[in-house]
Each structure stands twice: as C-alpha cells, then as structure tokens.
Image (cartoon, grey):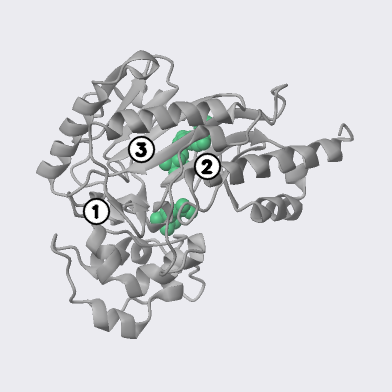
Amino acid sequence: MTYPTFSTDCQSMLCRFLTPEMFEALKDVQTSNGFTLEQAIRSGVDNPDSSIGVYAGDEESYILYAALFDPIIEAYHGFHPTDAHRSDLDPAKLKAPNPDPEGEFILSTRIRVGRNVADLPLGPAITREQRDEVERRVVAGLETLTGDLAGTYYPLTGMSPETQRALIEDHFLFKEGDRFLESAGLNRDWPSGRGIYHNHDKTFLVWVNEEDQMRIISMQPGGDIAEVFRRLVRAIAGIGSQVPFARSAHLGYLTSCPTNLGTAMRASVHIALPKLTEDRERFEAICAKHHLQIRGVHGEHSESEGGVYDISNLRRLGVTEVEAVQDMVDGVVELIAEEKRLRGTA
Ligand code: ADP
Ligand code: CIR
C-alpha cells in the first residue's frame, strides 16, 4: 500500500495528522490480531468527509499506531499522552435538576456508554466466531438482570424489516449500512451476531456488536437527566458484574473509535430551540463554550428536522462520567436561558 492521496478540501483528523513519514514507518506494523495501519485508516481514506477517519482493532492499535492516534485523541478530547483518566459514576455528584420542568424544549434524554469485552479484539479486528461468542456472553449477562432492567434480546437475524425500520425511526436501534463502519470492517457478516436488548418500556437498551460490542443506553422522554443517569449506572454495574469490560489505566474504557475512549459516554438531549438556532453562530458559540457537539435528529451524520437538535457532551476521555454529563447539563441550561431571553419570556 502507498500513502493515500487526500483531496485538498479534506478536513478529517486523518488528513490532518497522517504524514508520509509516519505512514512509511507504520505501514508494515501489525498488532497480534493481525490488524494493520491500512485497516485503521481505511474508513477515512474511503470517506474523505469523515470527521475523524480512524478506528482501532484492539488495545495494541492505540499503542503501535500512537504516532497517529495520540494527536487525534489530543485534538478531540484535549487529552495529552501523559494525562491520566479518572472514572466517577456516582450519581449523587451530578447537579442536574430538570432544566425544562414544563417540557417546553427537551423532547427526550439519552445517555449511552460504549463497552467491549476484555481480552478480545475490538469489532474491526474480530472474527466471526469471536463476535458470536461476544453475543452469547453479553446476552447471558443481560438475562441475569431483574426489576426494571429485565428485558428481551432481539437478534437482527430474523427481525422483520418493518420492526427494524420502526425501531430505527423511533431512535432505539442503530441504523444499517453506515459507510464509515463498512470501511472500518465493522459490518462484516452483517446481520449475524448483532441485536438489541431492551426492557418493556424501552428506557434501558443494549446494542450488541455494532460499532462497539456493547452500547448500554438509558433513555426516556423529557429532561430528567439525573434519572436517566441513575438508571444507566445501575445497568452498567449489572452488566459489568457478568461481563468483564476492556479497559486500560491510561485510556479508560477501550472503544473502536478514538472519540469514545475514556468514559465512552455520550449524554444527549433532543431539544427544540427555534429562536436561538436561527442565529447559528450564537448557538454554536454556546455549545462550544460547554464542550457540546451538535448532531441531527437521527444521530451522527444526520440533519436536524423540525428545528430539533441532538446536543451532547463532546469530551469523553480525561473527564469523569459525572463531568461529561455535567458538561451537557450546564450547556443545556444556558441554551434554554438564551432561547427564553430571545423569546422575551426569561
Ligand atoms: P451514538 O449515540 O451511539 O453515538 P448516534 O448518534 O447514531 O449514535 O445516535 C443513535 C440513536 O440515538 C439515533 O437514532 C439518535 O436519534 C438517537 N438519540 C440520540 N440522542 C437522543 C435523545 N436525546 N433522545 C432520543 N433519541 C436520541
Ligand atoms: C467519522 O470519522 O466521521 C466517523 N468515523 C465517526 C467519528 C466519530 N464522531 C464523533 O464526532 N464522535
């Protein structure tokens, strides 16, 4: 393989940080799972509109290809290679009274974490047998959950297209055919080994073998962020007691995309701010001040619909889980205050 040619307007972190010298030095380096630099960068090479453009096949990828991953991790999270990651999942420390008790702005709240199984490759380097083993172990762990976390696992294989479409449309299930994941090797053997577990109310859900082996999700209508966080913390503890999670002292929970390292947590609201979002610059400035990311209403790489945006914490590594959620809460409080001011109702 030769150094990829990037278009001059390419904005991805891969384009920014991969130099020809780095490429030459790393192109023949393989991890013990046989994962190569070419595989790590394929998503960003195939998709020049990537924001990041790289994926890891295992923990070793982050070490062997550190010359590429470290600057990306630093640019995204503000986390330096000598920094230490800390975890704090104590809901008592979160200051999150409902920022919208009247239900005027926040449609729903969702907090997810990514998790992978310890001592197995991550999705981009996993074999079909190992992926099936992940599914078996995760589902066995989920089946031990009780109370409001008790639910059912629905494999993607055999799910009717209508059910699948409705689950995606209602924001519960991952979409199919994502080209970024495709190039990363994350859609191999689709739909085998993939599925979704959820409780009766669909307030607790687990995606199995999508971008990460587990996406543990707590969600509900409205803006009671503290309740969503408390449920998530219980769910993580319940699953973690059954399935060992891949984790490193330096990078926290290990994930296939470097943007998810650390807490692997994305805490979001779907929120309508019709006045404020007319002034895109002001809207973006408030989000930037609180380290928030703006996504469309169908998730990453989607557009807003009906003036509803997905607002979430951007930083996941070098901050604790409590701090990541607090970023989102504090930002949402300011966004709502600004919307009210513009409406003249503050
Ligand atoms: P991830 O959350 O894993 O980073 P996406 O950005 O693709 O992945 O979002 C996954 C799904 O979750 C999408 O259907 C998205 O609309 C939905 N979602 C995200 N945040 C919320 C929210 N606050 N309320 C309802 N659905 C949400
Ligand atoms: C991309 O590079 O655009 C995709 N691989 C997704 C990157 C993760 N996005 C993010 O901002 N968290």
Which of the two marks, 2 or 3, is nearer to us in this view? 2
Q: Secondary structure at mark 3?
A: strand
Mark 3 = which residue?
Answer: 215
How far separated are the C-alphas under marks 1 and 3?
16 Å
Give the crowd class for mark 3: few <14, some 14-19, many >=20 residues within 10 Å.
many
Amino acid type of the residue that numbered disc 2 sits on in the rendered structure: Val
Quarter holding the N terminus is: bottom left
Q: Nearer the viewer, residue 43 or 18?
A: 18
Q: In terms of sequence position, does the residue under pointer 1 or pointer 3 come before the other?
A: 1
Instruction: Name the residue located 26 percent from the left edge and 39 percent from the top edge.
Output: 209
Can residue 18 be seen here? The reply is yes
Q: Nearer the viewer, residue 264 or 83?
A: 83
Q: Is residue 30 above or below residue 174?
A: below
Where on the image, by quarter, is ligand 2? bottom left
At x 19%, y 55%, the residue is: 125
Instruction: Say what amino acid the circle numbered 3 marks.
Output: Arg
Identify the residue at horizontal 27%, vertical 41% (top origin): 213
Residue 175's quadrant in the figure?
Answer: top left
Residue 322's disc is 2
Reading the image, the residue beneath label 1 is 124
Image coordinates for residue 16, horizontal then vertical, percent:
46, 74
* Residue shown at 13% from the left, 63% from the top: 32
The amino acid type found where label 1 is placed reads Pro
176 w.r.t. 263: above or below: above
Confirm if mark 3 falls within 8 A of ligand 1. Answer: yes
Tell me residue 11's x, y (percent). 50, 68
Mark 1 CB near ligand 2 (8 Å cut): no
State which tag comes first along the sequence, 2 or 1: 1
Q: Is residue 268 left or right of residue 197?
A: right
